[in-house]
């Protein structure tokens, strides 16, 4: 004999299934976000590669004609990029030699030591900015088409997940 007071009704069963489905959907979306999120250590390595290159660049002379240790150049170079004979990064001796420099997957330091980080890319853009600029924009091309006493250095790093980081510095001809 059936007792109407015990067990689940059809409505209670449907509501239970709906609640369990919603909970499973929330858990699945959370797990999907965790699995597809960029690995923090890979992001840290990519940023370290960018910072290391930026540190290397800003330690160089402002210009091919600048004295070692700094000093005002009365005749700044009019071109950005490696100067004659500087075909290898180990020969770069001033900031703008790095303009257009790019590496992907295999990265080297100044001594030629290499490290492999698959899917990571870093590249450099150096340009002149107006000496009177009050803000430095990391995205737009230089507001100055003529050589000035201030250079903007942008080191960009991208990760396998498509994230892009930009480190921006300026060097002045002092």
Image (tube, rainbow, N blue to C red):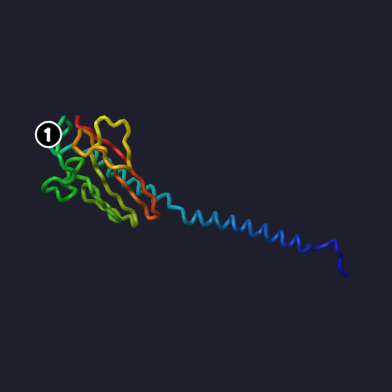
User: Looking at the image, which residue sits at the far right?
Assistant: 1
Camera-side residue of 112 and 77: 77
**Residue 108 screen position, x and y as percent:** 25, 51
Q: Which of the two residues, 161 or 134, is positioned nearer the viewer here?
A: 134
Q: Secondary structure at mark 1?
A: loop
The answer to whether 124 is drawn above or below residue 160 in the figure is: above
Q: Residue at x 12, y 36 (%)?
A: 65
Image quadrant holding the N terminus, namely bottom right
Pick the residue in front: 109 or 34.
Answer: 34
The residue to which callout 1 is attached is: 75
| Residue at the image point whose x is 31% and y is 30% from the top | 134
Quadrant (top left/top right/bottom left/bottom right) for the C terminus = top left
Residue 20 falls in which quadrant of the image? bottom right
Label 1 neighbourhood size at 10 Å, few (<14), some (14-19), many (20+)? few
In the rendered image, residue 101, in percent from the top left (x then y), is placed at: 23, 49
- The residue lying at 11 percent from left, 48 percent from top is 85
């Amino acid at each position: 004999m059936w007792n109407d007071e015990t067990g689940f009704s059809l409505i209670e069963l449907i509501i239970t299934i709906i609640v369990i489905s919603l909970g499973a959907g929330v858990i699945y979306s959370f797990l999907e976000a965790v699995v597809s999120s960029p690995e923090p250590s890979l992001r840290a390595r990519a940023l370290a590669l960018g910072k290391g290159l930026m540190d290397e660049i800003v330690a160089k002379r402002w210009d091919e004609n600048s004295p070692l240790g700094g000093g005002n150049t009365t005749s700044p170079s009019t071109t950005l990029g490696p100067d004659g004979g500087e075909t290898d990064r180990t020969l770069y001796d001033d900031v703008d030699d790095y303009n257009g420099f790019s590496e992907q997957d295999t990265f080297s330091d100044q001594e030629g030591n290499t490290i492999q980080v698959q899917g990571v890319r870093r590249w450099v853009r150096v340009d002149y900015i107006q000496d009177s600029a009050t803000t430095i924009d990391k995205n737009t091309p230089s507001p100055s088409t003529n050589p000035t006493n201030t250079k903007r250095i942008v080191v960009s790093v991208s990760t396998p997940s498509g994230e892009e980081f930009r480190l921006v510095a300026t060097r002045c001809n002092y």
